[in-house]
Structure formats: structure tokens, C-alpha cells
């Protein structure tokens, strides 16, 4: 048995915050606004896992109205969801991530991002794909106001 989930997240840029994607601090003049550390990659992958496991959404597990999750490390939240996946008798076999941003360029950071995700997902080397795309100057992303992320995750029975 194999199951696939889709995740999406977007955040606007905010001054005075570090830019963290997939647990990797990326040099950029602004970070992302959010209740947690606003790691849009970790959030999209988390929702993809929850969808594949039919286990709700990131907002149900970690509501932004709950002060416990203020400035939370999103990679730790992802690890918690991997535990939920395992409790349901499933394991992560693959994740694919597309980061949509005019800047920064994702390519130079893709390997480090994939390695961090593979560790958190307990999925092994070569199990995570990361790529960057621009929005060709269109919309809030094209204007450089923020980042959006699409992710898929594939689970199999353990």
C-alpha cells in the first residue's frame, strides 16, 4: 500500500527575522512572517505527510492561536508528525518540494535542505527532491513579497 499527500504553504517576507527553509538558514535580507519560525518548506511537507496519513492538517496539530507554538522550530513539528505517521503503521519513502520565490535562489541550498528533511523524515539518502522556481514576476511572489511552497509526500505501510 502506498499513499500520497499534497501540502502547500506561503508566507510573506518580514524584516528582522532569519529566513529558514527546511531547517536551513539562508542568507536573505528578510525572513518569513509567521507564528512559528515560518519555515514554509517544513510546513508544506508536514501538511503533505498529514494528508497522506489522513491525519488532519498542520493547523489542527499546531494551531497558531496556541502560545506553545510561538517561534517553534518547524523541523521539530515535522518530526512530531513523522511520529504520528509511524503510529499509523506508515513510513515516509519520498518527498518532493518546489519552492516558488523570485529570491533567494534555492539551487545553492537544495542539497543541505534535502539532507535536513531526509533526517527529519527518517527516509534515507536520495528520498527528498528540492527545486526552486520563480513566478516570472507575477503576483505577490513576483513582486518579491513572499514565498510559496508545494510539497508531495509518499508513505508506505511499514
Image (tube, grey):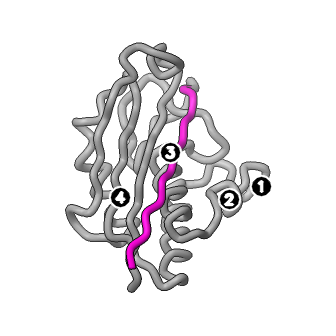
Residue at x 40% of width, y 82% of height: 157
Tell me, for residue 95, which label it has, or none.
Answer: 4
**Quarter placement of the N terminus:** bottom left
Above or below 40: residue 136: above
Query: Regarding mark 4 in the picture, which secondary structure is present there?
Result: strand
Question: How far across and how far down the image is residue 64, in percent?
Answer: 72, 49
Circle count: 4
Residue at x 34% of width, y 52% of height: 96
Name the front one of labels 4 and 2.
4
Query: Regarding mark 3 in the picture, which secondary structure is present there?
Result: loop
Q: What is the spatial separation of the Cα atoms under label 2 and label 1, in whole angstroms?
A: 7 Å
Can the viewer see residue 80 in this picture?
no
Question: How far across and how far down the image is residue 90, in percent?
Answer: 45, 80
Can the viewer see residue 94 in this picture?
yes
Residue at x 34% of width, y 66% of height: 119
Tell me, for residue 115, which label it has, or none.
Answer: none
**Quarter placement of the C terminus:** bottom left
Question: How far across and how far down the image is residue 121, in percent?
Answer: 39, 67
Asked whether disc 1 touches disc 4, contact meaning CB atoms under 8 Å apart, the reply is: no
Name the front one of labels 2 and 1.
2
Q: What is the spatial separation of the Cα atoms under label 1 and label 4, in whole angstroms?
A: 28 Å
Q: What is the spatial separation of the Cα atoms under label 4 and label 2, in whole angstroms?
A: 21 Å
Q: Which residues are magenta?
A: 1-13
Q: What is the spatial separation of the Cα atoms under label 4 and label 3, in whole angstroms?
A: 16 Å
Above or below 55: residue 111: above
Tell me, for residue 62, which label it has, or none.
Answer: 2
Q: Earlier in the sequence, mark 1 or mark 3?
A: 3
Q: Mark 1 = which residue?
A: 66
In the image, residue 131 lies in the stretch drawn in magenta:
no
Q: Mark 3 = which residue?
A: 39
Amino acid at each position: 500500500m502506498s499513499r500520497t499527500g499534497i501540502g502547500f504553504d506561503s508566507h510573506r517576507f518580514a524584516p528582522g527575522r532569519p529566513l529558514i527553509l527546511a531547517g536551513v538558514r539562508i542568507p536573505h535580507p528578510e525572513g518569513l512572517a509567521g507564528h512559528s519560525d515560518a519555515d514554509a518548506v517544513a510546513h508544506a511537507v508536514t501538511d503533505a505527510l498529514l494528508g497522506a496519513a489522513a491525519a488532519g492538517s498542520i493547523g489542527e496539530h499546531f494551531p497558531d492561536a496556541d502560545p506553545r507554538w510561538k517561534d517553534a522550530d518547524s523541523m521539530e513539528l515535522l518530526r512530531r508528525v513523522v511520529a504520528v505517521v509511524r503510529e499509523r503503521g506508515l513510513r515516509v519513502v519520498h518527498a518532493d518540494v518546489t519552492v516558488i520565490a523570485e529570491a533567494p535562489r534555492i539551487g545553492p541550498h537544495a542539497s543541505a535542505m534535502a539532507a535536513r528533511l531526509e533526517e527529519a523524515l527518517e527516509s534515507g539518502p536520495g528520498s527528498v527532491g528540492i527545486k526552486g522556481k520563480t513566478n516570472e514576476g507575477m503576483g505577490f511572489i513576483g513582486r518579491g513579497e513572499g514565498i510559496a511552497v508545494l510539497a508531495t509526500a509518499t508513505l508506505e505501510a511499514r
